[in-house]
Image (cartoon, rainbow, N blue to C red):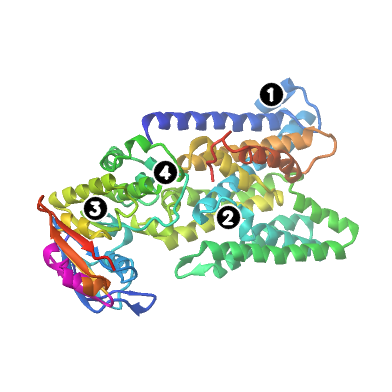
Amino acid sequence: MGHLSARALVPSAGGRALLEALTFDAAPGEFVAVVGPNGVGKTTLLRTLAGVTRPAAGTACLDGVATAAMRSRERARALALLVGDGDAVDTLSVRDAVTVGRYPHRAWWDWGIRDEDAGAVDGALGATGLQPLADRPLSTLSSGERARAWIAIALAQEARTLLLDEPTSHLDVRHAQETLQLLRGLADGGATIVAVLHDLNEASAYADRVALLGPGRMLSYDAPRVALAPGVLQAAYGVAFDVVDAPTGARLICARRA
Amino acid sequence: MSPRGGLRRAAVLIALAAVALLALVLGIAFGAVALPLGAVVHVLLHPRDGGDASTIVWALRVPRVCIAACVGSALAIAGFLLQGMLRNPLVDPFLTGISAGAAAAIALGVALGVTAAVLPALGFVAGLLTALVVAALARRGRGLDAERLILAGVSLSALFSAIVALALTRLARGGSDEILAWLAGSLAGRGYAELAWTAPYALAGLVLALACVPALNALRLGTQLAGAVGVDVALAQWMLLAAATMLTASAVALSGIVGFVGLIVPHLARRLVGSDARVALPASALLGIALVAAADTAGRALLPPSEIPLGVLLAFIGVPTFLFLYLRPPGSARLWGT
């Protein structure tokens, strides 16, 4: 459960193909990071894999079923798509917002919150450290706290496949590490994680494989050591990189000063 | 919701239900003709006794508070649905052009000498048609675009207001009085007949609204997120708009243009119980009933035998209350309830 695959997929936005045909797959237990420069099509790739954006060619499948052809509630039970929150400032409380993640588990007209729903919401609030803020309106949260609330909504869906668009971009170092550790833990528990990340060191430290997108095509889809090598990174970003092995065993990736 | 928050919300809902009930009882107890309270109670308990008191209570006051309840809850729920769906706290149910379309049709109807009994139905149909045109203009893909909906509603409303103004300036004095009575909003002269034929539409709108409650919470967080958790966004938008339209058109047919309820009541409800539609929608309905019933009773009882139009009285009470709640100096209140 949770095998995501696409062959000859051409992600496109507004009728314009963004990337050359690419092959993508992610297996249960795997944490895949998608990295690349701004505007290259990372979010579109994620949305195309989730089946909410139509590709120019190819099909994205979850366990052999085209995600674009799945019914929306059925898809939301199998696959959680965390989209950027935009300007979604609302007066809904954090707990009520996270409860929205339970929508696909009930009939669409059903108001009820069953024990399993409350349990999933509590679990998601706990995992994202939002329990103390549960009764606060979303509009009073900081952008980092709101980003965690959005992650909690995806967690409350209890889907086995999670596609996350920049889950750490508004977070401080500690919360970013906790979030990545949480995703790593979900993957180790058998979930399929695909996350767009901007921090190359986060991708290097936590991901099993990295999809590096460059202008117009996917440049590499491999283990971090290969996909985040200086040469290919320079091809993607147009900036020179130094990669250093730290004494702790971590690899540090730094852009060289222009 | 947390157990404590849940209890608090339930307590507020029960209190609101009590207030709404009290407002309805007051509406039966008081009116232009002063009846002793004992007589009202006696007549209520013995509907077959007959007499002047029985006629006043059963033929005038009871249908009137029922209509007040219907209008108040319909407008409040419609406002709550549209504010949540369009994610805009300034939206009121008349924004979709329903009231302006109804008013224009009624003004033309009066100008052409249509008999008064047909006017509510004429307003109802014109309101629905206007909402349909606005929705057609606001379409984007399979769904609706919030900005386009607001723009179309405001533009069409301006056009219809011009038609009303034209009818008013061209008409003899008698006709313009009738139009003005509609514009000011009033429950005077409505009875069981109007209630009987609008109630099915209002009820259909209510059922549709209740079914959309889970989707409404998701839509508050944006159409993208709602889609991601499995909401059929386009379908939910059409259902919400249909529900709000049926509720609003029923209210307009019953009462003319009663402004402000659909704007202010959802704000008050969210302030009291938070934004979760499962609680805020019933709270809006109860507050709407209480507000309209109380204002209508005051309008009848304050200056007998003349009546203060409901819409006028509501604006006199509502606007200062609203301004007090929302424009207090910063720091004295937390601004939530948008």
Residue A141 numbered tag? 4
Nearest to viewer (mark 4 / mark 1) = 4
Chain under callout 3: A
The amino acid at mark 2 is: Met
Q: Are marks 4 and 3 on the same chain?
A: yes
Please name the residue that numbered disc 1 is placed on: B41
Helix, strand, or loop for circle 2?
Answer: helix
Disc 4/disc 3 C-alpha distance (Å): 26 Å
Q: Secondary structure at mark 4?
A: loop
Instruction: Return the residue at label 2.
Output: B246
Quick check: B289 left or right of B4? right
Instruction: Tell me if residue A133 is in the magenta stretch.
Output: no
Which mark's residue is nearer the viewer, 2 or 1? 2
The residue at the point 66 percent across, 41 percent down is B323
Structural distance between the alpha carbons of marks 2 and 4: 37 Å
x, y (%) of residue B218?
A: 41, 51
Q: Position of residue B38 (x, y in %)?
A: 72, 20
Foreground of the two, B8 or B330: B330
Relative height, residue B205 to residue B22 (above, below): below
**Of circles 3 and 2, which is in front?**
3
The chain under label 4 reads: A
